[in-house]
Amino acid sequence: MQPKRLALLALFIAALTAWFALDLGQYLTLEALKAQQAAIDQFYRANPLLVLAAFFLIYVTLTALSVPGAAIMTLAAGAVFGVATGTVLVSFASSIGATLAFLGSRYLFRDAVQARFGAQLRGINEGMARDGAFYLFSLRLVPVFPFFAINLLMGLTPIRTWTYYWVSQLGMFLGTVVYVNAGTQLAQIGSLSDIASPGLLGSFAALGLLPWVGKWIMGLIKRRRVYARWTRPKRFDRNMVVIGAGAAGLVSSLIAATVKAKVTLVETDKMGGDCLNYGCVPSKALIKSARIAEQMRHADRYGLEGSDPRFSFKAVMRRVHHIIAAIEPRDSVERYTGLGVDVVKGYAKIVDPWTVEIACEEGTTQRLTTRSIVIAAGAEPLVPDLPGLAGSGYLTSDTLWEEFAKLDTMPRRITVLGGGPIGCELAQAFARLGAEVTQVELAERVLIREDEDVSALAKTALETSGVIVLTGHEALRVEGQNLIVGSNGAEQAIPHDALILAIGRKARLSGYGLEELGIETHKTVATDEYLATIYPNIFAAGDVAGPYQFTHTASHQAWFASVNALFGQFKRFKADYRVIPWTTFIDPEVARVGLNEQEATAQGIAHEVTVYPMHELDRAIAESATAGFVKVLTPPGKDRILGVTIVGDHAAELLAEYVLAMKHGLGLGKILGTIHTYPTMAEANKFAAGEWKKRNAPQRLLRLVERYHTWRRG
């Protein structure tokens, strides 16, 4: 703690010590006030300004120091100064004193508390930044809550000082009037309970509920205003209409059907969405073939004779499509129809908050009225505005599967634009299958969201697989079969037979009627924490809602969207993003959950890092898979897990143990105490926990134990 803060804290402690040591509280009792009332009245009549000033300063000081006595002082204000003057005096003195206590708490403790508990307090901080005045006003109306505690705790939050002052003055005013008025009848008061009776406190509690009732009424007014220009149907054809049959849409419609709601699922293209048809499934099938090819080429690593893999590229692509076809029935129209979902192939447009118009595949048009709507339209590849790109025959992570399936041989030269997860996966896979792959990334490193050591390891893995990785290079234009890139003012032409764009994906937002309804869209559909749009019955889930573009997150959001849509009038659930895992399926895999080092540092979250290298793991050595590590972030001196990054074989599977631990609040001590089969890759998790334990071992206790054992030896 800084010297100024230490000095202020010492002064505060000294003042409190003097208060209790000198028993100054004896002068602020009801009996003392009654005994001295006449003398105070006489002195006030002789020196009105002096008494007013002294009273004001004493009141401010007592409130700022958070010592008892404010209630008696408020009674004294009524007894000596009357209702009008006493109320004005106490109202300002109490608010100023409370604000000083608030500022003292903020200056002394906020930085330390936020640094230590920032992750846990994130939700509270966001709520206070958004609705702090509302919550403070509610608390100020209810004297049951100790005001000194409110002052100190609010100082740890991001609420603005001016907001804190005026809300406090407004919120405490009614209680101030009650106590000051009671002071005018001081002779009839036997104890403070005569003022703060259960009935009066109950009345204040009811007043405290008024803001919440007001918030509900304002919400009702807001909803009526949003719906004002629309005519609500008297009855509805459906309980829910879901737009899009990707992960979010399938889960939303399945949940609705499971709880016996009448639901229609509308899909304009292929059931299963991007993941089944263009993303997760085909890419992982390709990665497996490429990995086998790499193992054949380097079989000498396993004591075998290496050889160049001989294969038909057409057969590889045929296998990819066979795997899609094998999984397809799980997401098919027939399956979901059998589960109770009304599936319609066509293009959906929302024409009003309760009506969806469907341009059906067979050319007809259907209109459905519905209680709720879930928008789950997914995402599509980003295409940059590059000169010459439009007519170049470029491919995306969506279109390459169909186009490559038509080829007898793989393109010899492939350029991949993008150094994120999709770009890295495709670049390594095609390089391992024998293509000359060049990967271009504008940022200074690939996988820019990961820590620098992870990016460096990923780049090494790509280059080992034969990829030419050009980071810090900007794509400028396409000229014929060349991608022109620039770096440090110099241009370079990269020849290619196939150009694959993998710079990211954008939400599908146009054509669904969102603009006409006034639903805000900026990269994603704007929703609240319950995944509702400005219309409380229209929700979004999956890639269109953000903030993550993962299949498992889309399914996760679908539960919140569908349950809130169907049962929100009884209970609504906030979407929970606290523990979201993801993996980049290069070799070695890169898997992460929670914070990494660069995020923790950027957010100012105190942390320590524990790393266990894979080259020390027996199973990794036996598998010749020693590249990578397990990296765990924890608060200093504590085993609570803030985040984990794993690089290595089967990293995605290894990560699941940490996802479970973080979800249920289990620390590294629990992982260390769990038996892991030997020899397995999963032991890396246990050994990482052991590394943390060694670093945080109780050294003083160990020295005492050492002395004990020395004594036992004689």
Image: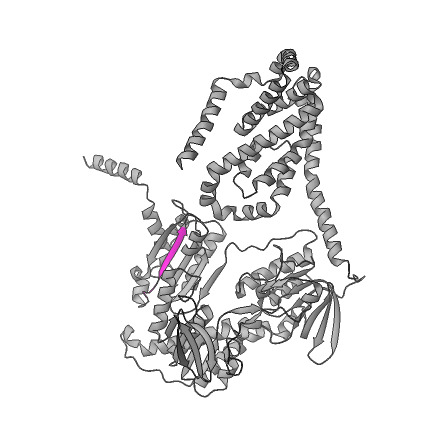
**Coloring scheme used:** one colour
Q: Which residue is outermost to the left? A: 714
Which quadrant of the view contains residue 63?
A: top right
Residue drawn 51% across and 78% down? 387
Pick the quarter of the image with the N terminus: top left
In this view, the residue farthest toward the right is 234
Spot occupied by residue 653 in the image (x, y as percentages of width and height): 43, 63
| Residue beneath the point at 45% across and 27% down | 11
In the displayed structure, 113 sits above or below 251; it is: above
Query: Observer-nearest residue: 443 or 300?
Result: 443
Span highlighted in magenta in the image = 625-633
- x and y, in percent, of residue 702 in the image: 28, 40
Whole-percent x and y of residue 351?
73, 68
Q: Can you say whether 205 is above or below 569 in the image?
A: above
> So how many labels did they put on this image?
0
The residue shown at (64%, 29%) is: 91
- Pick the residue in front: 711 or 53: 53
**Residue 363 magenta:** no
Q: Is residue 322 visible?
A: no
